[in-house]
Each structure stands twice: as C-alpha cells, then as structure tokens.
C-alpha cells in the first residue's frame, strides 16, 4: 500500500516547526475550551474560524489548527465532568456518571489521568482507522452519481434528525430552516432568489454568521437567563500520578469502546455523543450488576472517553470523503474547509493529498501532544475552570463580533448574527436541535444541485433518483434512520438529546 | 404545550409565505427540467407539514424564564444591536467596554466587577489586536484623533 | 511566515480574534477579487512576488482579497472609486471576460477598465473515461449532433460558464444548429466533473489541463482534444481540436487589468513589468508547477483579444439563453 508514502508526505508537512506549533497551540486552546462548562467543540471551532480566516493561514495550517482544537476539546470535556459533575460538552456527559463518584472517593487525579489515557487510546485508534478507511471510501466515490448524492444528503438529514431530537417533526423543521436559508441569494445558474430585493442578500447568508450566532451568541443568552450557574470545584485534586494498574485493567474496555465509538462516528449524523453512550452502555452490560457502574467504576470512566474520542475521529471519515459531516462539530469543520475553497469529497484525496495527509499526520501528533499535556499540566487546566462566566461570556461575545465583522466589515452580518443568536435560544428552549439548521445551510445548495443535475441527465425522469442499488439502499437507510428512533425510544430510555 | 403550538403556527405561516415567495422566482429561459422554484417549494411544503404536526402533537412546555428575565434578554439583544451599529463610527474601545460591562452585569449583577471586566476586556482585547496581532483596528472615533 | 507564526500562537493561546486589515497605500496593490486560495489569489501573489524579486517594482506588492459577486464587487469598486489609481492592478482570467460578456457585473462593461495582459493559460480540454466508446473528438461530437440527449457533459463551472461554452463552440463547428439541446451539468470544480465521467454518470468532461493531469497519469481518462493552436509541451500525444477539423482555441488565461482613468504611460509601465515577469525563470517555474502553458499577450494586442472573446461569448450566451 502507498499509505506509508502518503503518511511520509503528511509528516513532512505536519512536522514543520510552524505546523507543530499550531498543533500545540490548538491542543492547548482546545482543552481549555472543552473544559469550560458550556463551551464545547462546536462552539470553540465556530468562534475560531473567522479568526483563522483573517489571519490568512493557508489551508493546511488552518485545518491543523482547527482539528487540534477539535481533538483538544474532546479531551478537555472530561475535566469538568469529573471535577464538577458538569459535562464540559455533550459527549462528556456519560463521563460524569462514574467520573464524579470516583473523584468524590478521593481519586480525582487518577480519574483524570485514566480518562486522559482512554481519550488518547480512542483517538489514536480512530486516526489509524481514518488512515486506512478513508482512501478506500474515496474509491467508492466513482459509484456516486448525482442521484446517489441526493440520496446521501437526504440520509445525512434523516439520521442526524433522527438522533438529534426526541421529536422528528422538530428535526424536520430545523432542517427546513437551514435549507430555506441556503436558498437565499443566487442559485447555481445565476438567478437571484428570495432576496426581497435586499442587496446584502444577493450573495446569500454566510454560514459562518449563522454558526457563530447559533452556537456562541445563543450560549450568552442562556447564561444571562441562568445568571451563570455557580460552579465551584467540590472535590479535592490530590497528587497526580499515572495509575498503571487501572490502565492495564481497562485495556479491553478501551479497545471495545474504541471500536464501538469509531463505527458510531462514521455513520452520518450520529457523532461523538452516541459513541460515548453506546460504549458506556455496552461495557455496563458486559460488566453486569457487579461492575459497580455508576459508583465510580474505572471501566465506567475509560469507556465513554475512549468511545467519544474514537467517534470524533470516525466522524472525519464521511466528512472528508463524501463531504457529509457526521456530527455538529464536523459540520463546523466542513464550513471551515468551504471557506478555504477546499471541497471535501472523493477528489480531495487525489487533488489535495497534502491537505488530507497533513491533517492525518497532525492528528497523530496532536494525540501525543494531548497525552503529554494532559498528565503533567492537568492542574493548569483545572485552574481554567475558575474563570467566572461573567468574564468569559462577554469575552466570547466580543470575539464573535470582531471575528464576523472582520469577514465582511458590514454591520448587516452582525445584525444577522444577533438574529441567529435569538433563533438559537428559542430553538433550544423548544428542544429543536440547531445542528440540522447548520447542516441545511451548508448542504442546501449541494442538495438542490444534485437534484437538478440528476434531472438534466435523465431528461426530467424522477425515477432516475432510484435507478441504482446504491441509491435505493441510501433511500431505505434514510427512511429507517428517520423512523427507527421513534420506535427505539419506546424501548430505550435515552439519557438526553444528542447534539454534541 | 402552548409554546409548541404557537411556534408551529409561526413556522406554518412563514413556510406558506416562503412558498408564495418561491413561486415568484423568475425562471430564465435556459431552464433545466427542475428549475429554480421546485426545491424551495419542496422545503416549504415539508416545513409546513412538520409545523402542522407540531401544532397537533405538542411536547410538554419548556421551562420559560420569568418575565423579568425576558426583559433582561430583550435588553441584551438591544445592546448587541446597538453595538453592531456603533462599532464603525465609534471605534472599538468605548462600545466594547460598555457592551461587555452590560453583559457581565446581566450574568452576575455586581456593578464594580462588571465595569472592571468591561474595561479590562475592551482594553485587553484592543491591545491584543492592535499590537500583538498588528491589525488595523480603530480605537476611538476618527474625529477625536485627527 | 515567522511573523504569521507568532501571530497565530498569540491568537490561539489567548482566545482572541482578528480585525479588518487596513492596507497602507504606499506600495502598489493587487486586488484578488476572491477569497485566498483560488486562481485569482494565485495570480496576484505570484505576479506580485516575482515583480518585486526581479526588481520590476521597488516595494513588495500588497495583495488584497475582495471577494463578492464572482469578481463583480472588485470590478465595481475599481470603476467607481479608484478609477485613477496608478498603483493598482487587479487579477483577471477567462472568468472575468465571460462574466463581462454575460453582463453579470451589474451593467459594467469591459471598456470601463484597461486589460494589461495575460502571461499564462490553462488550456481547455475535452476528456472521456478510459473505457469510453468515443475514440476521437469527431466520434463524440457526431454522436451529440445525431442525438443530443445521448451525451451529458460535466464541467467545473456553472451553467453558462466557460467550461459549458467549450463544448458548445465545438458543437457549433460540428454543425449542431440548436445548441440549447446540449446537456451540461456544472459541478464543484473539475475534479468532481472527472469523477462523474469516470463513474459513467456523464459521458464527457470539459475542463482545464491542470484539472486532468493526475487522472491522465493514472490512466482513468483519455483526452480527446486540447483547445490550443498547437500541441502542449509535455502532452504531445493529445491532438488539438484544430487538427481534427474544429477551429476552437479556448483556455483559462491568467492576467491583469488596471483602472481606465490612468495615463498611457502608466499602462505601458505595467505592460512592461508584466512582460518582465513573463520572461522570468521564476514565472516559468510557477507555471510548470501549476499546469499552465505559456501564453503571453501584453498591451494593445491583449485588449483586442479580449474584445473578440467577449463578442463571441456574448453571441453564444444569447443563443443558449443565459442572457437575453
């Protein structure tokens, strides 16, 4: 295989001092963002995108920085789960179940290091999986015509919608809001649409404006509503050492959880939260009643962290090879790629090998950096939890404003951003997921073009959409993905909506 | 209950307006079989159907904040809108300090600390952009400096 | 790079943000009418860098990105606000002339600026999958003339864009009377168009040489014709359309325009500088690295070339109904 030579190319890019420094900075920043309650990988990456853009980073550097932030946030999420019993982000939710009891029992340091190692294991597993699987998937792309792409986009909406909310109608509305926004402005054939004659709208609504509004500004409103929940560390952080015994005892747990997480990550729309949920539940059933799950079991700490980090890596596979994001954060990363004029998809591997393999190499590097960072520096990250929300959230707002303002220099975009913030607040209040909105804005144009192109090829025959086995399979999967959660929910009690 | 019904109704109305707007889209005479109207109309239809479903089968009522908090949220939105308009004519420092202080106070009502964090964030961030990042940000209104 | 590095680190480590960059207007400025990373950005950065390196200008040329309206925002801005700026150059390509011809810049016309010159071209190509039944350009074109619905072309530009125009120009020469019956789908770049063609979803791909090089080497596709006056160096086995009897030359040229209101001396000055770049070794290297073929046309000759091109594209666009 030429994976080795490709990897060598990747390392030749990622090992430059400059890129390496970006990876370190991204990991550091990402861990902090992940650790802060309320700020997860989606928010973190969303706020930082306009900045990488204004910095004029080249494509590879920007991608390295943002994926380091992504992986870092996935690591960081566990810190507040364990110490505060508040998940730093959605995928870290399951870690609170055994992490906090373990910390209360006086083993906070062990829990942090063990979960850090589990994160490393899961992420490394996923990165290697990505390395082998992604090129294979990109060959599959020759089987994907316009009809198949249309069905694939539909599948992404249906599975994400099916997972993201407890109410399918609400997911559908969220997707339609996004798709409807995507239609505004010139279509691919140069006709202006639904602009109401407003010149600002002729080029459409920038998805970055929507993302920052929905994720960052809406978060500020929630903090105003709750007056910044009290957060203080209730457990003591004792000496930090490496709990070799625990790591050895959980080796198979980590392996199984990584496999489960990685597969969950690859499925379009499932994402990291599902990965950690499935990993935890399967380990719990393997351990049985005597496993001590929920009371500070080491396997209950290792499983969700290995699972969610493996899922985070797995979610990059469909994003890079098919241009269909598997989670909220990868949707934001997809937005970053599009801003950098990189169209993810099967041709990315042949057209821009330096981007793909540079990314994979830097993911490997980021993993080791994060492992090294998270053992000795864990006390520094813990300090970050002390930053009070009344400084943090105004800061986030200002960063969002200047970031968006620097994109276009227009107050119109800022007003739109505030509008999206209000929308995000209302949607989340009503338990309507926001990720399908983002997905709609990102994929709307592509989805419509796939449909229109398919009809050009077939001369207007709608049966062309179901003319290949792959297309039919995708349609069936889409319908199952949308309908199945309704029935599953009757049997399984879901812990919480999955939105990472 | 009521919230879902109201929101569903709003979405349904917007969706119908959207469909109406979509039928007005001009078609160039180089038309493909689908054309520029079909997909927007499809989206509007799905949204209207899902909204109807929401009206008929609403979820339990979410925890809405008390009226006073709504006032605070509305005020925050007004402040952010004013901030958006003032950034260009007023320069960075003063609007940022005021906005940051107001938001800080709204999250935790402690006057001195809020004022301090507003001024601190504003000046700190300005120094960062202007000098560490070497970006041309205008600190004060142009009329002050010239 | 080093400066950027510190910038980035500072930013990342402190959770901060960017701000609008205000360019200083001392040195000459090159506007790339698109986001960083595309062809126009490449033109500005390469030409700007080489002009400074070979001493054609004494200060480094500042590159400004002004994306919007497919280059229309920059065009309007130059015409309306910087019509007499002698220190300004703007990156242009075939897309600029196509959009001007199609009136896509809100009523702006080509004579509102001055086209300085082109110094490289990405030659147009027509490609089919390796297992395609079409062995020559004539096979393909005659099949379309006989039954237009039997062939779909895929290209990297939108409907009515330049990739769409190339097969139409060829088919007109082949005797097709109603070119609106030709099936064309516009995708996100040439790579996608090739993938669709290799997969058998579309029968032919229309694009630029730089887009197909990788696929030619891997043997997945065959090029039926290159749209240049002579065969391209390094690709001597690809016949031109002209030698197969279809008189079409079309490529994506890379060049510059400047504001209308500058003096003839300024025009000649920039034309001279561009010629210097065209003659430099650095440019030869940059072209080779990016799949461009030499195509140097500077000064008044270039203006005449643009005028002809615009007339032809406008006629064709009216015929297929992109414009009225």
Image (cartoon, coloured by chain):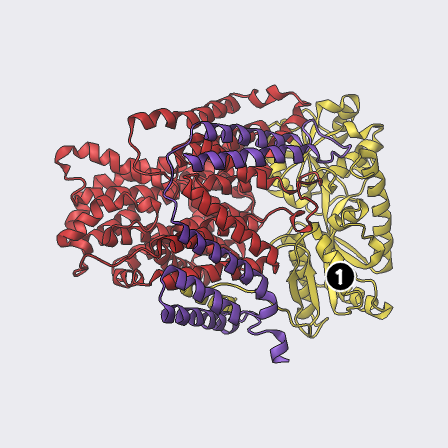
The spot of residue A9 in percent (x, y) is 47, 51
Q: Which residue is mark 1?
A: C78
Q: Which chain is purple?
A: B
- The quadrant holding residue B114 is bottom left
The spot of residue A415 in percent (x, y) is 57, 54
Under circle 1, the secondary element is helix
- The answer, for residue A362, to whether it is visible in the render is no
Query: In the image shown, does C49 or C322 lie closer to the viewer?
Result: C322
Q: As drawn, which residue projects farthest toward the bottom?
A: B146
* A178 sits left or right of C62 in the view: left
The spot of residue A226 in percent (x, y) is 35, 53
Q: Does A431 sit above or below residue A463?
A: below
**Which quadrant does the C terminus of chain A fall into?**
top left
Q: Does A313 sit above or below residue C131?
A: below
The spot of residue A307 in percent (x, y) is 30, 41
Q: Chain of mark 1?
A: C
* C61 sits left or right of A31 in the view: right
Density class for disc 1 (Cα within 10 Å; few <14, some 14-19, many ≥20) is: many
Q: Which chain is yellow?
A: C
Residue name at image x 58 percent, y 65 percent: B86
Instruction: Look at the image and give the colour of chain A.
Output: red
**Which quadrant does the N terminus of chain A fall into?**
top left
- The answer, for residue A203, to whether it is visible in the render is yes
Query: In the image shown, does C244 or A132 lie closer to the viewer?
Result: A132
Q: Does C277 sit above or below residue A188?
A: below
């Amino acid at each position: 295989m030429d994976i080795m030579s490709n990897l060598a190319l990747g390392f030749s890019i990622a090992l430059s001092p400059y890129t390496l420094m970006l990876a370190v900075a991204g990991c550091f920043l990402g861990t902090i963002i992940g650790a802060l309650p309320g700020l997860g990988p989606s928010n973190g990456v969303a706020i930082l995108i306009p900045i990488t853009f204004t910095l004029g980073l080249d494509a590879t550097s920007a991608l390295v920085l943002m994926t380091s932030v992504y992986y870092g946030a996935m690591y960081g999420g566990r810190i507040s789960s364990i110490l505060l019993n508040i998940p730093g982000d959605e995928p870290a939710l399951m870690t609170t179940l055994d992490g906090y009891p373990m910390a209360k029992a006086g083993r906070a340091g062990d829990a942090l290091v063990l979960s850090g190692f589990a994160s490393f294991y899961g992420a490394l597993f996923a990165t290697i999986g990505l390395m082998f699987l992604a090129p294979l998937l990109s060959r599959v792309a020759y089987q994907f015509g316009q009809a198949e792409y249309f069905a694939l986009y539909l599948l992404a909406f249906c599975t994400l919608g099916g997972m993201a909310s407890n109410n399918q109608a609400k997911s559908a509305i969220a997707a339609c809001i996004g798709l409807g926004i995507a239609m505004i402005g010139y279509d691919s054939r140069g006709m202006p649409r639904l602009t109401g004659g407003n010149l600002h709208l002729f080029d459409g609504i920038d998805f970055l404006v929507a993302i920052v509004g929905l994720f960052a500004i809406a978060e500020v409103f929630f903090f105003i509503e709750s007056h910044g929940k009290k957060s203080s560390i209730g457990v003591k952080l004792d000496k930090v050492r490496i709990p070799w015994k625990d790591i050895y005892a959980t080796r198979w747990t980590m392996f199984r959880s990584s496999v489960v997480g990685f597969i969950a990550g690859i499925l379009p729309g499932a994402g990291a939260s599902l990965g950690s949920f499935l990993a935890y539940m399967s380990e719990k059933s393997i351990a049985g009643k005597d496993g001590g799950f929920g009371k500070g079991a080491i396997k209950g700490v290792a499983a969700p962290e290995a699972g969610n980090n493996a899922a985070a890596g797995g979610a990059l596979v469909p994003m890079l090879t098919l241009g269909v994001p598997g989670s909220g954060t990868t949707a934001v990363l997809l937005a970053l790629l599009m801003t950098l004029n990189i169209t993810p998809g099967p041709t990315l591997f042949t057209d821009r090998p330096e981007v793909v393999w540079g990314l994979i190499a830097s993911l490997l590097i980021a993993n080791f950096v994060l492992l090294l960072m998270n053992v000795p520096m864990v006390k520094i990250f813990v300090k970050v939890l002390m930053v009070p929300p009344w400084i943090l959230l105004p800061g986030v707002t200002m960063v969002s404003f200047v970031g968006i303002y620097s994109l276009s220099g227009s107050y119109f975009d800022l007003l739109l951003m505030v509008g999206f913030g209000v929308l995000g607040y209302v949607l989340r209040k009503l338990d309507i997921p926001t990720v399908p909105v983002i997905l709609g804005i990102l994929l709307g144009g592509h989805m419509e073009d796939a449909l229109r192109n398919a009809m050009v090829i077939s001369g207007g025959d709608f049966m062309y959409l179901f003319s290949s086995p792959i297309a039919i399979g995708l349609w069936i999967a889409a319908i199952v993905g949308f309908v199945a959660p309704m029935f599953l929910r009757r049997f399984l009690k879901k812990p919480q909506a999955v939105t990472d | 209950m009521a919230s879902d019904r109201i929101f569903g109704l709003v979405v349904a109305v917007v969706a119908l307006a959207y469909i109406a707007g979509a039928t007005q889209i001009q078609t160039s005479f180089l038309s493909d079989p689908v054309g520029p109207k079909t997909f927007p109309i499809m989206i509007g239809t799905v949204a209207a159907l899902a909204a109807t479903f929401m009206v008929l089968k609403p979820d339990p009522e979410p925890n809405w904040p008390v009226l006073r908090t709504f006032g605070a949220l509305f005020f925050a939105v007004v402040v952010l809108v004013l901030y958006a308009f003032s950034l260009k004519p007023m320069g960075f420092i003063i609007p940022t300090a005021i906005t940051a202080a107001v938001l800080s106070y709204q999250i935790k009502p402690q006057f001195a600390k809020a004022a301090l964090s507003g001024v601190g964030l504003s000046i700190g961030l300005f120094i960062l952009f202007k000098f560490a990042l070497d970006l041309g940000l205008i600190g004060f209104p142009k009329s002050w400096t010239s | 790079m080093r400066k950027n590095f510190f910038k980035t680190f500072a930013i990342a480590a402190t959770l901060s943000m960017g701000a609008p960059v205000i360019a200083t207007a001392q040195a000459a400025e090159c506007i790339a009418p698109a986001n960083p990373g595309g062809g126009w950005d490449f033109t500005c950065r390469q030409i700007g860098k080489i002009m400074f390196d070979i001493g054609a200008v004494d200060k480094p040329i500042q590159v400004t990105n002004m994306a919007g309206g497919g280059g229309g925002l920059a065009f309007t801005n130059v015409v309306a606000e910087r019509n007499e700026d002698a220190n300004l150059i703007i990156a242009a390509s075939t897309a600029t002339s196509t959009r001007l011809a199609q009136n896509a810049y809100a009523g702006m016309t080509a004579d509102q600026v001055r086209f300085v010159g082109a110094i490289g071209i990405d030659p147009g190509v027509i490609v089919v999958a390796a297992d395609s039944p079409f062995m020559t350009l004539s096979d393909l074109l005659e099949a379309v003339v006989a039954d237009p619905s039997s062939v779909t072309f895929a290209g990297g530009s939108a409907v009515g864009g330049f990739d769409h125009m190339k097969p139409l120009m060829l088919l007109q020469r082949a005797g097709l009377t109603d070119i609106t019956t030709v099936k064309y789908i516009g995708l996100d770049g040439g790579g996608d168009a090739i993938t669709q063609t290799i997969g058998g979803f579309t029968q032919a791909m229309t694009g630029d040489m730089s887009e197909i090089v990788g696929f030619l080497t891997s043997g997945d596709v065959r090029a039926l014709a290159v749209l240049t006056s002579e065969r391209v160096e390094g690709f001597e086995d690809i016949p031109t359309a002209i030698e197969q009897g279809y008189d079409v030359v079309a490529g994506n040229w890379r060049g510059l325009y400047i504001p209308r209101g500058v003096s003839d001396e300024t025009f000649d000055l920039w034309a001279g500088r561009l010629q210097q770049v065209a003659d430099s070794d650095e440019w030869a290297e940059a072209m080779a690295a990016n799949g461009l073929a030499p195509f140097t046309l500077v000064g008044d000759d270039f203006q005449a070339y643009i005028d002809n091109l615009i007339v032809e594209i406008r006629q064709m666009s009216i015929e297929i109904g992109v414009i009225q």
